[in-house]
Image: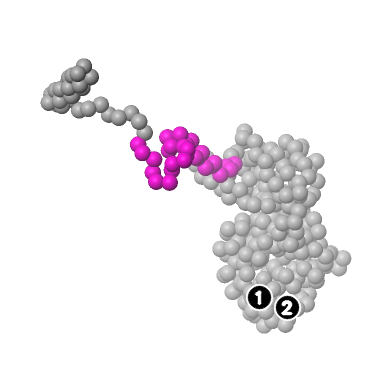
């Protein structure tokens, strides 16, 4: 009887709470596991949340330290006083790192994509040609002696095998120009601007016909945008006049006269196109706009 009376009193008390508008206490146990979750599986509350995906690598100007990889080569540019404004400006050689992959660099509120960095500072003199890993700080071009949009003040460098076996080796057109020209000619005839950009020395220079015409300097994006129209322009060769792509597809382009002068083996000119051989690889260096 004592047990039954206690149960009766508890029921009456619960009824009184409900009658007074008091809801029963909320259960504290976890809700039933979904089907198939039995057998000791952890509940959703016990599983750690997945980590957020990492932000992509970002590059910033000095004082932030950057590490980049690519191929170092000496590039011929025009020096003072005109820095290319006059064909009489002397030729200077500067070390440039051609990046394996273009990088995005925060410059103020804008972001610039670059694929080549001129090496600067006393540390640049110790960087040997070839595939290198370079550590330093990035800064924008400020004078005529700066030939790429952004430069890297070299702190140190080391050989890298990150370039070995990649398509950089496949893009290197080595040997004499007679051996390299068929690849250029094929890309021109197929109107393959991406292949031409792969074989270009970036940024590519595009001077006008006259000495006082402004010189355009094009990175890969600008080159890809301008290239289709260039292929439809005159090839810049003796008559008959015809578009560059049409000339490249003709038998006349099989063995062009390319040598600038006797004994000059590291430069070539075919109509509106000028080429240079740097670090053993032939590159399309200039396009002379009509």
Q: Is residue 194 magenta?
A: no
Earlier residue among tags 2 and 1: 1
Q: Residue at x 53, y 46 (%)?
A: 111
Question: Toward the viewer: 240 or 167?
Answer: 167
Mark 1 lies on a secondary structure that is helix
Q: Quadrant of residue 196?
A: bottom right
| Overall secondary structure of the magenta section | loop
Q: Position of residue 51 (x, y in %)?
A: 51, 39
Residue 270 drawn above or below residue 17: below
Estimate how packed mark 2 is, as few (under 14), some (14 to 19) or many (20 or more) residues with alpha carbons within 10 Å.
Answer: some
Q: Is residue 32 magenta?
A: yes
Q: Position of residue 120 (x, y in %)?
A: 72, 41
Q: Position of residue 149 (x, y in %)?
A: 62, 48
Question: Toward the viewer: 239 or 233?
Answer: 233
Question: Toward the viewer: 35 or 156?
Answer: 35
The residue that disc 2 covers is: 253
Residue 44 drawn above or below residue 4: below
Q: Indicate the quadrant containing the N terminus: top left, top right, bottom left or bottom right.
A: top left
The residue that disc 1 covers is: 189
In the picture as drawn, the residue positioned furthest to the top comes out as 2
Q: Quadrant of residue 271?
A: bottom right
Q: Residue at x 67, y 83 (%)?
A: 240
Report, in whole angstroms, how far the alpha carbon at label 2 lies from the one at label 1: 10 Å
Residues drawn in magenta: 31-59
Q: Residue at x 62, y 33 (%)?
A: 63
- The answer to the question of whether label 2 and label 1 lie on touching residues, with beta carbons closer than 8 A, is yes
Left or right: residue 227 versus residue 165 is left
Mark 2 lies on a secondary structure that is helix
- Res 7 seen here: yes
């Amino acid at each position: 009887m004592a047990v039954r009376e206690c149960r009766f009193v508890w029921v009456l008390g619960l009824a009184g709470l409900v009658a007074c508008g008091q809801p029963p206490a909320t259960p504290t146990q976890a809700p039933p596991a979904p089907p198939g979750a039995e057998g000791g599986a952890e509940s959703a509350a016990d599983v750690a949340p997945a980590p957020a995906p990492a932000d992509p690598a970002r590059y910033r100007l000095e004082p932030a330290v950057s590490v980049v990889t690519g191929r170092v080569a000496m590039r011929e540019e025009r020096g003072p006083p005109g820095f290319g404004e006059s064909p009489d400006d002397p030729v200077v050689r500067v070390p440039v790192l051609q990046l394996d992959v273009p990088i995005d660099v925060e410059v103020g509120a804008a972001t610039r994509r670059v694929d080549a960095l001129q090496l600067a500072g006393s540390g640049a003199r110790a960087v040997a040609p070839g595939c290198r890993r370079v550590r330093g700080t990035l800064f924008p071009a400020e004078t005529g002696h700066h030939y790429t949009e952004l430069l890297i003040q070299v702190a140190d460098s080391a050989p890298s095998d990150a370039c070995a076996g990649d398509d950089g080796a496949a893009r290197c057109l080595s040997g004499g120009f007679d051996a390299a020209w068929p690849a250029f000619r094929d890309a021109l005839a197929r109107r393959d601007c991406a292949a031409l950009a792969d074989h270009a020395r970036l940024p590519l220079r595009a001077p006008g016909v006259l000495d006082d015409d402004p010189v355009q300097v094009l990175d890969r994006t600008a080159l890809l945008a301008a290239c289709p129209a260039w292929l439809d322009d005159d090839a810049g060769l003796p008559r008959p006049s015809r578009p560059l792509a049409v000339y490249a597809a003709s038998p006349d382009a099989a063995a062009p006269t390319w040598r600038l002068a006797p004994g000059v083996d590291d430069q070539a000119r075919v109509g509106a196109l000028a080429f240079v051989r740097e670090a053993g690889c032939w590159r399309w260096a200039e396009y002379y706009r009509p």
